[in-house]
Image (cartoon, helix red, strand yellow):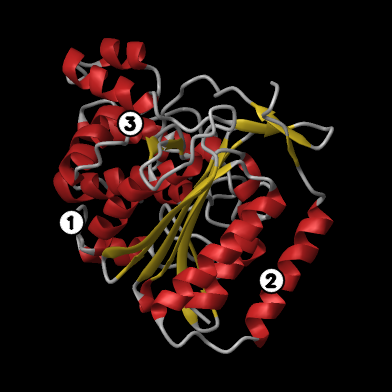
Amino acid sequence: MAGTDLVIPTMRALRVGVGVVLAVLALAPRPAAQGLSYSLFERYLESLREQASIPGLSAVIVQGRRVVWEAGLGKADVKKSIVPRADTPYLVGGLTQTFGAVVLGQCIERVALDISAPIRRWTADIPEASATIRHVVAHASAGAPGTLFAFDPARYATLTSVADACSERPFRQTVAEDIFDRLGMGDSLPGRDLERMASSSPFFDDARLRRYEAVLQRLAVPYRVERSGKATRGDYPEDQVTTATGLVSTALDLARFDIAVDRDDLVHGDLRAEAWANVTSNDGVPLPTGLGWFVQTYNGERLVWQFGQVRDTSSSLVLKAPGRDITLILLANSDGLSAPSALTEGDVTTSLFAKLFLRLFVS
């Protein structure tokens, strides 16, 4: 498409460039005011975005349970020169897992769902007979369940059957009704296929679908990286909404979700604490996941995070430092936010974007 090509640097060049940025930050004096930290973060975030050739990026920082900074960088639509905003919608991919975990948490509270029960009671898609709901939520169901961590969104998606059964509604309706509507997440959608929604439940009436259609008109354009090293307009994958992927949201709406989670507005604090604690293997070894979240330590601070990656379409990252009461939310319209990193291994510090945030706000 004429006028939409963007040069993508090699990963080595990107790491070199970011290495310079982080070196400068390491040598610089600590900012005297929080406002200066935000200014520095935006400046270097834009540098990272350019070096990774991510066309458009929306970003929000939540601290003290309120949005303290937001930005839209680059282009949500390169051809039309539309600048993204904090309320620009994106396909959030794997961040959907956190919503799935909340729905299961609500099932625990409402109908006493036992997550230690074998998941084969709800689905035959997990072959291991001893695999429990907890194993699947923690990405520890493969092979000998409870032994090893293996990030597998397809297995996590089987939790949709559990969510549907305990809520007695399709998962997408539960999220729309119990989370999006409840929290005022007006720019978030339970998928992109309006026809499928209309046929799935009377809940998705004409008025609601018209509102959803208006949000879809503002959806960030997806971009893919070609072998030639250029980014060109891509295509969204076939719509599929599960507990693992498929939701559409914005950085500001995700901030509303983040604040509600911190306030225990969606599930009680004991369940949140369990979700944010490392699951241990059968041998007592901590795994890199809690329930629906990754959990790790950085410089003595606990980090709770999750990411999304839809190939040639979009990427996302939510990174929380609960001890500092601060959260970073990033949404991009290419997979460049997460594709170069080894986030599936459970270490958020492999992300150069996360490193920048941690250096300024958590170190």
Residue type indicated by callout 3: Leu
Of marks 2 and 1, which one's residue comes earlier in the chain?
2
User: Is 334 in front, or is 87?
Assistant: 87
Circle 1 residues within 10 Å: few <14, some 14–19, many ≥20: some
- Quarter occupied by residue 48: bottom right
Circle 2 residues within 10 Å: few <14, some 14–19, many ≥20: some
Residue type indicated by callout 1: Asp
Per the image, the residue denoted by label 3 is 189
Of marks 2 and 3, which one's residue comes earlier in the chain?
2
Residue 188 seen in the current view: yes
From the top left corner, tell me how far across and down residue 247 is, in percent: 40, 34
From the top left corner, tell me how far across and down residue 248 is, in percent: 40, 34
* The label number, if any, that marks residue 30 in the structure image: none
Per the image, the residue denoted by label 2 is 21
**Could you tell me which secondary element the residue under label 1 belongs to?**
loop
Residue type indicated by callout 2: Val
Per the image, the residue denoted by label 1 is 265
Say above or below: 90 vs 343.
Answer: above
